């Protein structure tokens, strides 16, 4: 039974006792808080009384806190609490963390679907075998990247390796929320780089595919491909464009450029409203699509967003296959545009504004380095070197006396 003092904040409260645990008021209330600062001590172990809890509270709140400790750890909670405190001080191993997390998962059977539980359990076992002996303090992003790559090198699918780290992150965050450790994840929401090179079209391939789609695909599919391929816009953004969102710049009767105004809206703008500028040839072609159309009509045509997305499989992929390309999907055009901006020497900040991303995200996700670019860079550096003999070694022409 707990003994409590009066809640009068003007006097030091009496100790609160629950079982063999005792809480003492050790620090006066602050000006803004009438609650004393308490320390709860357990029975002596090896001559010392371990601290079970500390914090600001009223005597009634302290009694409730100590009661919860007793409920969780028994009438004599010291041994269990001390063991956990020592484990936290030493640093949990991955195996210990996963074991505790999985015990929680099994105690809450409705938390995950049956198939998810099976997949998580398999990856939890694999993580325990592979990296269970490491302490959480030893894990770093580079180490996890190497582990991810090694799993793939040994035959695991990329999705399986991704799931393995997702399970580790889930257990990790659960442990952090439950104060089993103090280590934040090596990098918040870490996304490991896919070591395989994503195939992407060159701009000459884009032009060849566009020529085929202009002949064989519906008008809306060609228009969608034309804009995405030459600006790097998202398909959802392009689908959401209205005739009234097009701004054409003219000099007398000549089209000299223009922009597409992306609006805020569900399913339309992923990263907010922005302007995407068009080259003069693209602006001139888009200007031709506007004749006789109302401002509230969709620029590419009256279709659903899902139909626009499905256009990659129905029209883009067949055209790419005809030229012998293996890349598929609208995002291939988006990555090609990112490469084209870089090849043209466009400032990365400007290119990122066109794509609707941060510079870091654009360079990490959408840029790739081709062998011919590496060769060109090496050749350019070598060509820039001029070997000159020291001045005192240059022979003077005899006619100079």
Image (cartoon, grey):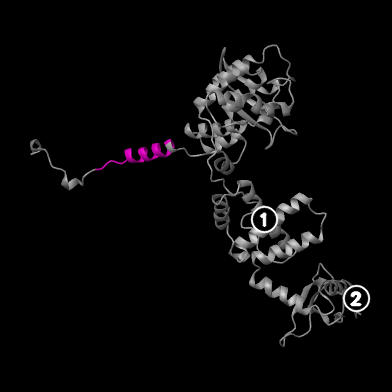
Mark 2 Cα-neighbour bin, 10 Å: few <14, some 14–19, many ≥20:
few
Residue 9 point in image, percent of width and height = 87, 75
The Cα–Cα distance between marks 2 and 1, rounded to whole angstroms, is 54 Å
Q: Is residue 77 magenta?
A: no
Looking at the picture, tell me which residue is in the foreground, 127 or 210: 127
Name the residue at 68% across, 33% down: 273
For mark 2, give the secondary structure: loop
Name the residue at 67% across, 55% down: 123
Residue 280, image quadrant: top right
Residue 151 point in image, percent of width and height = 57, 53
Looking at the picture, tell me which residue is in the foreground, 128 or 332: 128
Outermost residue, front side: 155
Pick the quarter of the image with the N terminus. Answer: bottom right
Pick the quarter of the image with the C terminus. Answer: top left
Name the residue at 85% across, 72% down: 71
Answer whether residue 249 is visible to the viewer in this image. Answer: no
| Magenta highlight range | 372-387
Residue 81, image quadrant: bottom right
Name the residue carrying label 1.
Answer: 123
Q: Which mark is residue 115?
A: none
Answer left or right for 245 relative to 258: right
> Does the CB distance between marks 2 and 1 fall below 8 Å?
no
| Disc 2 versus disc 1: nearer the observer | 1
Magenta segment, prevailing SS (helix, strand or loop) = helix
Name the residue carrying label 2.
Answer: 8
Residue 385, image quadrant: top left
Answer whether residue 379 is visible to the viewer in this image. Answer: yes
Vertical arrangement, residue 156 with respect to residue 224, above or below: below
Mark 1 Cα-neighbour bin, 10 Å: few <14, some 14–19, many ≥20:
many
Residue 353 point in image, percent of width and height = 59, 35
For mark 1, give the secondary structure: helix
Name the residue at 72% across, 76% down: 83
């Amino acid at each position: 039974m707990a003994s409590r003092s009066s809640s009068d904040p003007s006097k030091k409260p009496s100790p609160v006792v629950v079982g063999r645990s005792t809480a003492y008021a050790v620090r006066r209330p602050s000006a803004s808080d009438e609650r004393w600062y308490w320390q709860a001590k357990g029975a002596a172990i090896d001559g010392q009384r371990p601290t079970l809890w500390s914090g600001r509270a009223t005597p009634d709140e302290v009694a409730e806190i100590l009661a919860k400790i007793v409920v969780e750890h028994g009438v004599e909670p010291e041994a269990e609490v001390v063991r956990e405190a020592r484990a936290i001080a030493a640093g949990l191993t991955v195996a210990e963390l996963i074991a505790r997390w999985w015990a929680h998962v099994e105690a809450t059977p409705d938390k995950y679907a049956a198939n998810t539980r099976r997949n998580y359990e398999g990856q939890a076992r694999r993580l325990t075998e592979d990296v269970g002996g490491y302490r959480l303090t030893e894990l770093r992003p580079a180490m996890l990247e190497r582990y991810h790559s090694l799993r793939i090198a040994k035959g695991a699918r990329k999705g399986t390796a991704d799931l393995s780290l997702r399970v580790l992150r889930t257990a990790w965050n659960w442990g952090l929320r439950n104060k089993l450790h103090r280590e934040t994840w090596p990098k918040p929401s870490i996304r490991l780089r896919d070591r395989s090179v994503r195939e992407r079209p060159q701009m000459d391939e884009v032009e060849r595919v566009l020529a085929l789609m202009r002949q064989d695909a519906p008008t809306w599919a060609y228009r969608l491909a034309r804009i995405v391929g030459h600006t790097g816009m998202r398909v959802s953004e392009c689908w959401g464009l209205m005739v009234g969102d097009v701004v054409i710049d003219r000099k007398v009767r000549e089209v000299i450029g223009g922009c597409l105004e992306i609006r805020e809206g569900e399913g339309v703008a992923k990263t907010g409203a922005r302007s995407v500028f068009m080259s003069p040839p693209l602006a001139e072609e888009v200007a031709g699509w506007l004749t006789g159309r109302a401002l509230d009509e969709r620029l590419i045509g009256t279709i659903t967003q899902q139909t626009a997305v499905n256009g990659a499989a129905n029209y883009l992929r067949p055209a790419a296959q005809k030229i012998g390309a293996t890349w598929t999907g609208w995002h291939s055009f988006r990555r090609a545009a990112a490469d084209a901006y870089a090849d043209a020497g466009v400032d990365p900040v400007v290119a990122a504004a066109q794509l609707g991303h941060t510079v870091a995200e654009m360079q990490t996700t959408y840029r790739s380095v081709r062998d011919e670019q590496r060769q060109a860079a090496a050749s350019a550096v070598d060509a820039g070197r001029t070997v000159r003999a020291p001045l005192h070694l240059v022979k003077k022409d005899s006619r100079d006396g």
